[in-house]
Amino acid sequence: MKIKPNWDALGIGASIACAIHCALLPLFLSSLPFFGINIIHNISFEVGMIVLAFVIGSISLYHGFKKHHHSWRPMIVFFIGFVFLVSKQFFAHVETWLLIPAVIFIVSAHLLNFRYCRLHNHAHKDDCNH
């Protein structure tokens, strides 16, 4: 029995984890520096979360595009969200205002991909490899 990961679920989970980290972590874990732990505004952690979300999201959306629906719409929405997500790293004074649309666009892209995959259920074209 071969186990296949649900890339959309992983992408949504990574996006939500990123949103929780960026929005709620400072509220609940502001005492961590007293213990020598600092993941709040840690650039390595931030970049790692962004890269993780990008990799999982790209794999998920590419799989849905190639094997199921052949629609560019989820990918376009996803990359718009990533423009906002990366922009928040450079414009810290408006971080929250860039994070909110980033999460909305990225999660929407995964939901669109999931919906399109279910609607088309292997809509084959000439470029399908299965």
Image: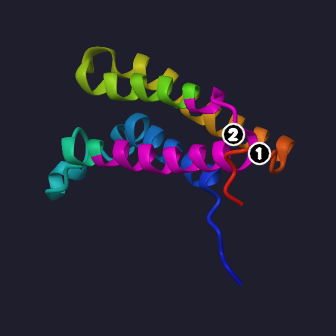
Nearer the observer, 109 or 45: 109
Query: What type is the residue that disc 1 sits on?
Result: Cys
What is the chief secondary structure element of the magenta stretch?
helix
**Residue that appears at 60% across and 55% down:** 7
Describe the colour scheme in one phrase.
rainbow
Query: What type is the residue that disc 2 sits on?
Result: Asn
Q: Magenta segment, which residues?
A: 48-75
Look at mark 2 in the image and give the residue it sits on: 113
Label 2 packing within 10 angstroms: few (<14), some (14-19), many (20+): many
Would residue 109 appear left or right of 40 to someone viewing this image?
A: right
**Percent x, y of residue 111:** 69, 38
User: Which of the image's four quarters has the C terminus?
Assistant: bottom right
CB within 8 Å, label 2 to label 1: yes
**Residue that appears at 59% across and 43% down:** 61
Q: Using the image, determine if residue 4 lies above or below residue 22.
A: below
Q: Secondary structure at mark 2?
A: helix
**Residue that appears at 52% across and 45% down:** 57
